[in-house]
Image (cartoon, grey):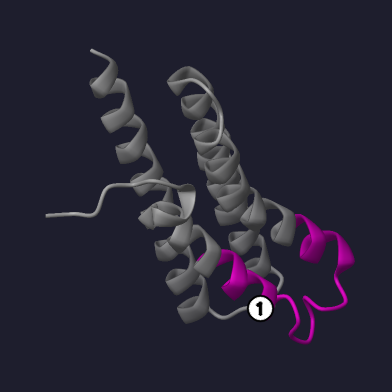
Amino acid sequence: MSKKVQCFEDLIIWQKAIEFAKEIYLLTERKGLKTDFGLKGQLRNASVSISNNIAEGFERRSRKEYLNFLNIAKGSAGESRSMIFLALELGYIDQEEHLQLRNKVKFLSGSISNHMNAISKADN
């Protein structure tokens, strides 16, 4: 039996989003990305936006607001995925690292969708 979610820190999607953001922060400290301030900043902002929007939505008063913030978090996951592709194209990461990061953020995006569906069904 799974533990009851009492705070956003209990959510697996939030935990995975934090792990992803940490990985992006470490990635952007490497040669190349470290000095591409535009891509570095945007990639960091988008990756952090995922966990922040999950947390902010959870703390809101209504399911409708929570779903809106989850939708924004999902959008930030897509933005992150797009920038990871750009990092590959610019030679900042190799194909293997691109696939690893892409799979992580796609899983995160899918998990957010599943969470949104579960919340929507709970309303019915």
- Residue under the point 56% across and 52% down: 51
Residue 112 locus on image (x, y percent) = 40, 43
Q: Residue furthest top?
A: 124
Question: For this view, does 118 lie left or right of residue 45?
Answer: left
* Number of numbered callouts drawn: 1
Q: Main secondary structure of the magenta part?
A: helix
Give the residue displayed 36% in from the left and 32% down from the top.
Answer: 116
At x 48%, y 20%, the residue is 62
Q: Nearer the viewer, residue 38 or 113?
A: 113
State which region is magenta: 20-42
The answer to whether residue 106 is visible is: no
Residue 28 is at least partly visible in this image? yes
Q: Percent from the top left, x then y, of residue 50? A: 57, 49
Residue closer to the observer: 86 or 10: 10
Residue 47 percent coordinates (x, y): 63, 57
Q: Residue 40: within the magenta?
A: yes
Q: Quadrant of the N terminus?
A: bottom left
Q: Is residue 108 magenta?
A: no
* Residue 12 picture quarter: bottom left
Residue under numbered circle 1: 27
Q: Amino acid at mark 1?
A: Leu
Picture quarter containing residue 2?
bottom left
Percent coordinates x, y for residue 114 in the rendering: 30, 39
